[in-house]
Amino acid sequence: MTDKLIIFDTTLRDGEQSPGASMTRDEKLRIARQLERLKVDVIEAGFAASSNGDFEAVKAIANVIKDSTVCSLARANDRDIARAAEALAGANSARIHTFIATSALHMEKKLRMTPDQVLEQARLSVRFARNLCGDIEFSPEDGYRSDVDFLCRVLEAVIDEGATTLNIPDTVGYAVPELYGHFIRTLRERVPNSDKAIWSVHCHNDLGMAVANSLAGVKLGGARQVECTINGLGERAGNCSLEEIVMAVKTRRDYFGLDLGIDATQIVPASRMVAQTTGFVVQPNKAVVGANAFAHASGIHQDGVLKARDTYEIMRAEDVGWSANKIVLGKLSGRNAFKQRLQELGITLESEADVNAAFLKFKDLADRKSEIFDEDILALVGNDTRTGEQEHYRLVALSQQSEMGERPQASVTFSAGTQEHVVTSSGNGPVDASIKAIESVVASGAELLLYSVNAITSGSTESQGEVTVRLQLGGRVVNGVGSDPDIVVASAKAYLAALNKLHSKNEKVAAQG
Ligand code: KIV
Ligand code: ZN
C-alpha cells in the first residue's frame, strides 16, 4: 500500500452530468488544463461513447494533457470500451473506467440481468479493456447497496482479469461515514486478491456526507484514491468536493498521514473557472472556495487574527489560491500584453481568430471599465469568445428605457444564423423586457428555471455582473452565462447563450440511464 492519496477528478464527467452543466469541447479543454496545473493525478475527461461531442472532448484532452492520466468512462460493453480506447489513443497516460451495476435493485429493474450475467459481463469487459489499455478501473455501480458476497465475487473476478483500480460508488449518496469505511475494509479483507489493485471511493452528496464518507473510506477502509469534483459539482446534491478532500488531508496530515501531489494554490482558480463555465455559482459559506471562507466578520475574530493568525485560521487563504483582486490590464494594454496575461492564467485559445475575438471584447470592456481584473478576463474568455459551432444567436445591440413608475421598454438587436432581428418589447423590468423581445422572435417554448446575478469582483459597483440563466425544454436543461458591466446586457447575453445550447442539440447517452 502506498502512502499517497490519488486524486481522481471527475468534474468533466460526473460533474457535467448535473442538469445544465454541460460544457463544450473548448470549455472542457480549458478546465482540463487547469486540472493539470492543479496536479490532479487522474482527469476523467468524459464518457466517449455517450456522444460525438464527448468523444471529441476526451480525444482533445488526451492529446494535450501530459502530466495527468486521462480517463474515459465506458459501460461494460465492447463498443463503449473500444470507443474510449480510440478517444484516448493520443494520451501520454490513459485509463479506461468501465462500470456495471451490481445492486439487486439495479440489476433487476434497470439492467434486467441476473447476477451471474452481470458477473460474466463485468469479467469479459475488463478482459477486453485490458487488451486495449494497461490501466483499467472497474466500478460496480450502486456498489454500496450491493450484496457484499456477490460484490466480492465480482471484484475478485475483475482483478483476475487485470483491473488495476477498484472503485466503490455510493451512487445514491446513502452511506454514512463509519459504515462506508467499514464496507471498504470488509471488501478489501474478503476479496482474496485485493492487494493487486488500488481501492477507490466515489461518494455522492445526497445526505451532505460525500466528503465525510470518502475520508472514512480512506481512513477506516484503506482506500488510496478519492473521486471528486471541483466545487462538488454533480447531479442532485453533487459529488464529493475536491477542495474539501484535499484541504482536509493536507490540514490534518497528523491524522491521515497521507501525501498528495496537488498544488493547492490552483484550487481557487479552478473553482472560479468551473463556476464561471457552468454557471453553477459557489455558495458564499462553502468551505475553502466560498467568498466568505476566509472572511472574519466578527470583531472578536478579526482582533484575534490580527494578533496571531492561527487563533482563528487553520489554513491560509493564499495557500489555496486566494489573492486580492488585482488590476492586471487597462484601456491602454495592447494585444501582446493581453495574450501574455491569457498565457499566465493558463488560457490557451485555439486559434488566432479566437485571440482576436477575445481581444476585441477586452477592448470593448476596457472602454467601459477602468480596471480589468483576472476574473474579468476569465469571464470574457469563458462566456463570450467562442467562435465555434454554438454561436447561432448573438447579441448585437441593446437599449432600454426605465423610469420609476413607468413600464420599461427594451429594444434588442440580435442575429440568428445569418439573419439580424431588431425587436422591441415592454416588461416588468428592463431584463424582463429584453428577454420578452428576444422571445418574440425565437419563440423557444423553453421554461426559465433559474435567473441569477452575481458581481464578478467584489468591493465595487464598477464590477461586471455575471448572469446565469437556466432553461428547460423537452427534458433538456441548459445553462447560459453572460457577463457585462450592464446587467441587462449580461442578462440578454446569458439568455442567448442558453438558447445557443438548446440549439446545438448535443445529445448524449446518460451514464446511468
Ligand atoms: O455514481 C456512480 O455510480 C458513477 C459510476 C459510473 C462510477 O458515477
Ligand atoms: Zn457518480
Image (cartoon, grey):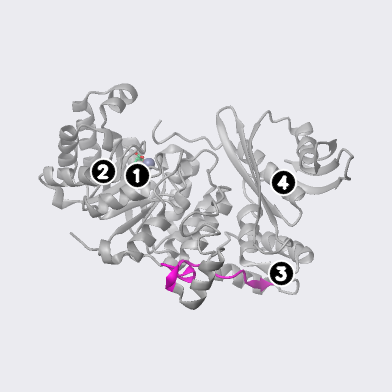
First along the sequence among labels 4 and 2: 2
Amino acid type of the residue that numbered disc 3 sits on in the rendered structure: Glu
Q: Which residue is mark 2?
A: 180
First along the sequence among labels 3 and 2: 2
Find the distance from the CA under tag 4 to the CA under tag 3.
Answer: 22 Å
Q: Which residue is mark 1?
A: 203
First along the sequence among labels 1 and 3: 1
Considering every residue shown, the one lying at the far front of the view is: 300
Q: Which residue is mark 3?
A: 371
Is residue 220 positioned above or below 264 on the image?
A: above
The answer, for residue 151, to whether it is visible in the render is: yes
Amino acid type of the residue that numbered disc 4 sits on in the rendered structure: Ser
Task: Classify mark 2: residues with Cα within 10 Å, few (<14), some (14-19) or many (20+).
Answer: many
Mark 2 vs 1: CB contact within 8 A: yes
> Residue 258: x and y, percent?
27, 63
> Residue 449: x and y, percent?
62, 35
Question: What stretch of residues is rendered in magenta?
Answer: 310-329
Q: Which residue is mark 4?
A: 491
Which element is circle 4 on? helix
Task: Classify mark 3: residues with Cα within 10 Å, few (<14), some (14-19) or many (20+).
Answer: some
Mark 1 vs 4: CB contact within 8 A: no
Q: Residue at x 79, y 65 (%)?
A: 367
Q: Residue at x 25, y 38 (%)?
A: 125
First along the sequence among labels 4 and 3: 3
Find the distance from the CA under tag 3 to the CA under tag 2.
Answer: 50 Å
Which element is circle 3 on? loop
Amino acid type of the residue that numbered disc 1 sits on in the rendered structure: Cys
